[in-house]
Image (cartoon, helix red, strand yellow):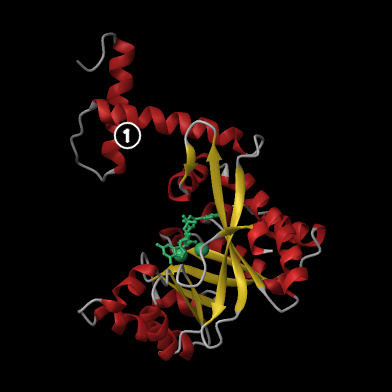
Amino acid sequence: VDGENPETLIKNADIAMYRAKTGGKNQCIYCSPELKDETITKMKLTNSLYRALDRNELYLNYQPQIKAETQEIIGFEALLRWNNKEYGLVSPNIFIPMAEQTGLIRQIGLWTIKTACEHFKSFKKCYGKDISLSINLSIEQLRDNNITEKISKVLLDTETNAKDIRIEITESIAFNEDPNILQRLIEIRNLGISISIDDFGKGYSSFNRLKTFPIDILKIDMDFVRGITSPSKKDRAIIRSIIQIAKNLNIAVLAEGVETKEQYTYLKDNGCDMIQGYYFYKPMPANEIE
Ligand code: C2E
Ligand code: MG
Ligand code: MG
């Protein structure tokens, strides 16, 4: 049933073992046909990702960020998109982890910074006001000891002012364990770039980190924003507390995933500085932003 020759049997056993390992230890997993299909698709997808840059399948969308008080646009977050010939639009939640696992994220990430800086130059010219550009950076990119020089070179090449750039990183265990990551972040911040913590509150949030890491902005995770309208008062309490802590530490707060007027009003009234979400703007291609 699980393979008609030794090679296939071992391969399928390997697929099941891999799944068991990723699902935590001490599990028994059988190699079902669904699991096999999934694994094959993932392998094909990963192979296509290797060629995505060369085939011009990657592009960037930009989501405006607004000042809560005045509703004026104060910046944009660059969001990576992959339109594959065979699979169509693949979600970043699927292909970014693949890019991280394969190490491709370093190359793709650098392309993202360069492309975003080029677009940003044109946004600035069109808009005429002070705006910033937020770029997501994977922890994997921070493991590259030369990342600071690479970013610095892109800024120089694209004539971008470091003061206009914000790097977004999500919290992860790596944060705590690898002292090099802190070092890279300090170097990047010394260029004049500011640091945002993405999806704050979702994963491994640590108060200690707010103390030790150079942080300029906290982005409240959208799960909390969704809870604003729920009967339980817990999400609202957490949001108010995050805003208070941030204020006391001189860190700005941005709420993401704001979809309704009610959510926006609650956040503004409780001192949230910036807003990002479908209620105001969805991510859009560069020409639409212009
Ligand atoms: P993120 O950085 O937290 O980005 C916010 C995500 O929320 C984006 O999803 C955005 O489209 C979505 N979003 C914004 N407003 C709303 C809203 O009002 N409602 C809802 N339901 N969603 C909203 P997206 O573009 O699918 O990106 C997912 C994640 O993929 C990002 O989360 C980020 O972690 C990662 N990502 C995207 N681009 C890059 C990149 O260039 N580099 C790296 N390393 N990661 C990236
Ligand atoms: Mg982000
Ligand atoms: Mg986020």
- The residue at the far top in this view is 5
Q: Residue at x 72, y 73 (%)?
A: 127
Q: Residue at x 30, y 82 (%)?
A: 236
Residue 259, compared with residue 151, is above or below; it is below
Q: Residue at x 36, y 67 (%)?
A: 202
Badge 1 marks a residue whose secondary structure is: helix
Disc 1 marks a residue whose amino acid type is: Tyr
Residue marked by disc 1 = 18
Estimate the x, y position of residue 82 in percent, counting from the top left. Answer: 54, 44
Estimate the x, y position of residue 165 in percent, counting from the top left. Answer: 67, 69
Query: 2 or 59, which is in the foreground?
Result: 59
Quadrant of res 33: top left
Residue 238, compared with residue 285, is above or below; it is below
Quadrant of res 230: bottom left
Residue 123, compared with residue 116, is above or below; it is below
Q: Is mark 1 within 8 Å of ligand 1?
A: no
Residue 247 in sight from this viewpoint: yes
Q: Quadrant of the N terminus?
A: top left
Query: 138 or 27, which is in the foreground?
Result: 138
Residue 192 in sight from this viewpoint: no
Q: Residue at x 38, y 74 (%)?
A: 260
Q: Is residue 211 left or right of residue 160?
A: left
